Image (spheres, rainbow, N blue to C red):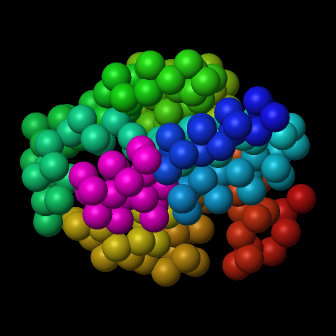
Amino acid sequence: MDGQQDDQEHNDTIRELLREMEEHSVGESGHAVRVAVYAVATGERLGMDFEALTRLRQAATLHDVGKIQVDRALLRKIGELAPQEFAELRLHAQKARKVVESLEWLAPALPMIVHHHERWDGAGYPDGLVGQDIPLGARIIAVAEVFDTLTSQVGWREPIPEEEAIAEVKRCSGKMFDPVVVLAFLAIQPLVQPVW
């Protein structure tokens, strides 16, 4: 019974953080949930076990939780960000630590949250991790987030069709994204012929 109670409390906490994210930046909770769905489906395709998928779901849902610590006006800005604004926004990956560090049960998810903007080629942030040094969950979230951002309305850009977003994910395989994760992600997309 304690396990079920813990699960309920954890889910309640995640929902509360999602509410805070949505209040801080409209549309953020919908993005978080979609990214989590894509990420878990990709993780299942890669053969992750139940516990790993649970941690991945938590991390994917809260991947942008650090934005709670970012100036609300910046998150709501219409149009492209200036270089200094973009630099401030990038800090959300590290600021996630402040938001969740007191929640011990989220400790296994934190590296995925912090490193979801790392790139396969090492050109990402915050630490410039390369290849398999990036936690697998973070590599999965990276693909899922970019796909959802491309296909959703955001303040600085109109959404693009899913076919174009899929083409962009393919183009970035081996540069931004782990090629194996890309294959798994593509395999779960209804618009793509099976690749496995």
- Please give left or right for residue 16 compared with residue 86 in the image: right
Give the left or right position of residue 183, taking residue 71 as reference.
right
Q: Nearer the viewer, residue 27 or 78?
A: 27
* Residue 164 percent coordinates (x, y): 52, 74
In what quadrant of the picture does the C terminus appear?
A: bottom right
Query: Where is 83 relative to 34, above or below?
Result: above
Write the residue at 65% across / 43% down.
8
Q: Position of residue 149 (x, y in %)?
A: 42, 62
Residue at x 40%, y 23% (from the top left corner): 97
Q: Quadrant of the N terminus?
A: top right
Q: Residue at x 32, y 27 (%)?
A: 95
One can see residue 115 in this view: no
Can you say whether 182 is above or below 59 in the image?
below
* Horizontal and vertical percent position of residue 104: 56, 19
Instruction: Identify the image quadrant of residue 105.
Output: top right
Whether residue 24 is visible to the viewer of this picture, yes or no, is yes
* Residue 107 position (above or below residue 61): above
In which image quadrant can residue 83 be found?
top left
Query: Magenta stretch: dominant SS?
Result: helix
Q: Position of residue 163 (x, y in %)?
A: 58, 78
Q: Residue 21 magenta-drawn?
A: yes
In front here: 3 or 191? 3
Q: Which residues are magenta?
A: 16-32
Residue 157 covered by magenta stretch: no
Q: Looking at this view, is 56 or 14 the one in front?
A: 14
